């Protein structure tokens, strides 16, 4: 009888150990970038890898050099493709320094990137931009 219990226990432990359960780890964020595409538009990108990511995005601020999820600064979700490439586009004020922190969350925890700094350009209108040209 003891042998049957021992064999049953070993069988249950083996089933639990090899049940196909995935080892989920905290996400990893690499290559965070902020690129100005015009004086008011910024493209954001990063690579986010994990077997599971439940929430992702960027928090940003013109006040804090290290914005966080708990601060009441800006936050954008963006998109995350099957290869882990996160992208988002923001329209921001001109001639302003912004700080961006990328984040990815799963059941294990939240990963954040190093802060990325970008100063938007000072917009100088082109002569051709005049909405009221002289007749």
Image (cartoon, rainbow, N blue to C red):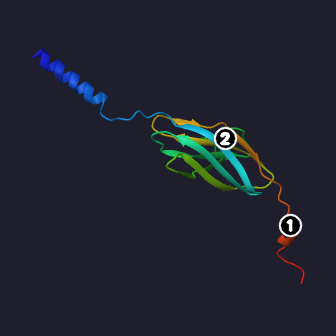
Residue 104 at x, y percent in the picture: 54, 41
Q: Residue at x 71, y 50 (%)?
A: 35
Q: Is residue 62 above or below residue 4?
A: below
The N terminus is located in which quarter? Answer: top left
At a point 63% along the width and 41% down the height, the residue shown is: 31
* Residue 94 pos. (x, y %): 79, 55
In this figure, which residue is indicated by the disc labeled 1? 126
Identify whether 82 is placed above or below 128: above
Judge whether 131 appears above or below 71 on screen: below
Reply above or below: 135 against 122.
below
Q: Quadrant of residue 48?
A: top right
Residue of label 2:
67
Count residues near mark 1 (Cα–Cα under 10 Å), then give few for <14, some for 14-19, many for 20+.
few
Residue 57 is labelled as: none
Determine whether, in the image, residue 11 is placed left or right of residue 119: left
Q: Which SS class for mark 1?
A: loop
From the viewer's perspective, is the residue at label 1 or at label 2 nearer?
1
* 22 or 106, nearer to the observer: 22
């Amino acid at each position: 009888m003891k042998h049957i219990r021992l064999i049953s226990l070993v069988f249950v432990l083996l089933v639990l150990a090899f049940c196909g359960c995935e080892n989920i780890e905290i996400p990893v964020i690499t290559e965070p970038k902020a690129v100005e595409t015009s004086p008011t538009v910024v493209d954001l990108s990063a690579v986010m890898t994990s077997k599971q990511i439940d929430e992702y995005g960027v928090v940003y601020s013109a006040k804090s050099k290290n914005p966080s999820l708990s601060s009441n600064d800006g936050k954008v979700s963006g998109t995350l493709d099957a290869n882990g490439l996160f992208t988002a586009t923001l329209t921001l004020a001109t001639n302003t320094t912004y700080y961006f922190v990328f984040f990815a969350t799963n059941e294990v925890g939240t990963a954040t990137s190093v802060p990325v700094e970008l100063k938007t350009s000072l917009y100088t209108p082109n002569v051709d931009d005049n909405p009221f040209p002289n007749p």
